[in-house]
Amino acid sequence: MEQIFKPAKLLLNKLSFSKKFIILFLVVFLTVSMLSAYLVFNNYNETQFTKKERTGIVLLQKMFPLMQLTQQHRGLSVNVLSGDKKAEATLEGVEEKVNNQFKSLSAFLASQPGLNVAQKDISNIRSNWETVRQESLSVEKNESIQMHNELIADIQNTLLDIADETNLTLDSNPVNNHINNLLIETLPQISEFMGKSRAVGVGAATKQTMTEDERIELIYLLKMMEDTVLKAENTYEIVFKLQPSLEETLGSYASNSVNDAKEIANIIDQDILNASKITIEPEIYFSKTTDTINSIYKLLKYQTDALDELLEANLKSLTLQLYVTLGLAVAMMLVLMYLLIGFYQAIRDQVNGIQAFTETTSQGDLSKTIDITSNDEFGAIGDSLNYMIGSFRNVIQSSQDVSQEVAAASQELLAITEETTKATNQITSSVEEVATIVGNQAAESKNNVRLMDDFTQQLTHISEVTYNVGVSSNKTTEEAENGNIVVEETINQMKVIHKSVEQTSDVIEQLGQRSKEIEIILNTITSIAEQTNLLSLNAAIEAARAGEHGKGFAVVANEVRKLADESSKSVEQIRHLIEGIQSDTLQSIDSMKTVAKETNVGMNLIVQTGDSFAHIFDSTKQVAIEIQGAVASTKTMLSQAGQLTSSIHEMASQTEMTEENTQTVAASTEEQLASMEEITSSVNELSIKAQQLQEMIEDFTL
């Protein structure tokens, strides 16, 4: 654990207290500042996040009427195309409202930079709207419905893009998240499924019949509408459970819209899909579906207002949190600064008091004490210093008495040591003369020992050399005997080699003779091949004369001639090989003759070597006998020299003991003399120190 804080201790120990507190203040200040900045930054980001959500709410509030008007335009267009002339005036009014809504959207987007995706989507929707407005009444009813459906699908996708771009889909609050899903997906889908059902149902009610495709489409729309309404019911149940206050605001509107949607679904199912005959008036069906769609859009309006209120409350909470965070951070910094400054001043006063006390004490004033004002470690230090000064004051008082007594005793001791030193000098001179005489005797004894040791070492060396020579001569005799045996074996082996060489020479000569016989056989084969060639040529001539009957024979003759030619070529190749073998055989014969001659010469040399080894063996045996005698004589001399060396060593040892005793006595007297001189010097110094101690003690104020 100590090692962990060692670098910090080294750093702080190099600084004064003021610098230490500045560093600590900066560290704490920076830490608190960074934490505060982090909290403020997060709070700011959340605030901006919420503000952007509120911008999205405003944009959605402007998009929902556009979607509602487009759905109305689709229904009115179907009515007009179905023959309802009264709907034309209403249709024109809806178109005017759509154009005004686009102007309102454009003005809002111009005041909100950064909504690039939404601006692009709305620009595309406006362009598509112009196409729908101009062409919806000039095409077939189904095509007009399809054009409106695509435009409304673009509006729904734009709702999703707006939610993404304005952080609505990223809201982590579960209530806000569910409300957002209702706003941008569930409720618009219900209104769109109902709007499509209105367009198809009005057409069917007007005609009092429907095609199979219209029936399938209406069944699909009914199923999707029922599923989406059920999803909306479940979502509202979750929202009201999480946020009960919203049930008071939105509960009745949500319940009415869901019930109206279920009623429209029931009308579609009972009065259109499952009716034996469609009798419902198109105006009534159109009016009811339109009222239900309008109630859904009213719910969207109330719901966006409720969500905006939640976001506004959250924004106020974030703003309050920001102010509280900043206030707490500033308060913490002020309190921290106040405490650190007070802490610094308290420590500074304690340190200054201790410093002033130590300065007066260092000047010899022991009458003062430290005024203790704190209960911390500085208070403990003050108590310890006061106790130390009290103890030191007592020591100084005792030292005054002791120094006077030491000064008097040192004078008496100085006189005694001077007399003892004179007597010790006389003893030392006598002992040194005796030590000189004994030292000369010891030197002579050491010289005799050294000479005898050298003689013994030389004699030992001679004995070792003689012994080694004897061992070497025995080995030489053995090696000579072994060499003689090896030479005899070599002679026998050379005889075998000589015999093998003669046999090999005979075999090579026979090989040469065989190659000559093969050459004769080859000549015979060559002659046969030439005759076969002539016969095949004659056969070919006869086959040519025979005409058509001789063609088969001509082929055979031609093949025989080819075989004869190939036989001639093969014989020629064999002849070349035989000639090479004959040449190599002649060279081998000459080489084997040379080997036979060299083998004879080698045998003669080996025989001579065997004779030489026999003479060497006899000579080395005689030398070994003589060396054994020399070794025995050397051992006798070495034994006698050892006895003489032991006697001389014993005498030298006794002389050394005498010299050591004398030197010990001399050293003791010299040490005693040195000790007396040191005692005299110490007594002088003690007298001086006692005087100095008295002078130093007089400097202290007790």
Image: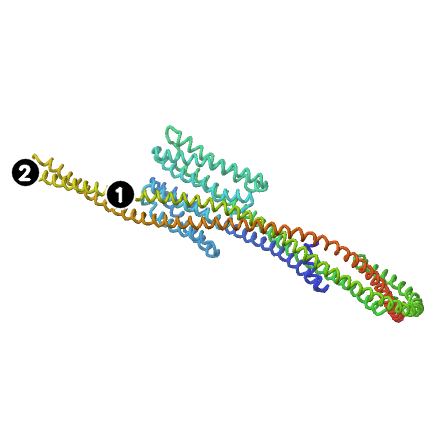
Residue 540 x, y percent position in the rendering = 10, 39
| Dot in front, 2 or 1 | 1
Q: Which mark is residue 76?
A: none
Query: Quick check: marks 2 and 1 in contact, CB under 8 Å?
Result: no
Q: Is residue 412 left or right of residue 274?
A: right
Q: Is residue 531 left or right of residue 364?
A: left
Q: Given the image, on which type of amino acid does mark 2 rest?
A: Arg
Neighbour tally class for label 1: few under 14, some 14-19, many 20 plus, Cα within 10 Å = few
* Residue at mark 2: 545
Q: Which mark is residue 513?
A: 1
Q: Residue 248 is drawn in which quadrant?
A: top right
Mark 2 to mark 1 CA distance (whole Å): 49 Å
* Mark 1, secondary structure of its residue: helix
Q: Is residue 140 left or right of residue 260?
A: left
Residue 472 x, y percent position in the rendering = 58, 51
* Mark 2, secondary structure of its residue: helix
Q: Given the image, on which type of amino acid does mark 1 rest?
A: Gln
- Residue 693 visible to the viewer: no
Residue 571 x, y percent position in the rendering = 21, 43
First reached walking from the N terminus: tag 2 or tag 1: 1
Q: Is residue 689 left or right of residue 114?
A: right
Q: Residue 190 is drawn in which quadrant?
A: top left
Residue under the image location 52 percent in, 36 percent down: 234
Residue 5 x, y percent position in the rendering = 69, 56
Q: Work out whether residue 495 or residue 386 is closer to the camera in this orientation and state it.
A: 495
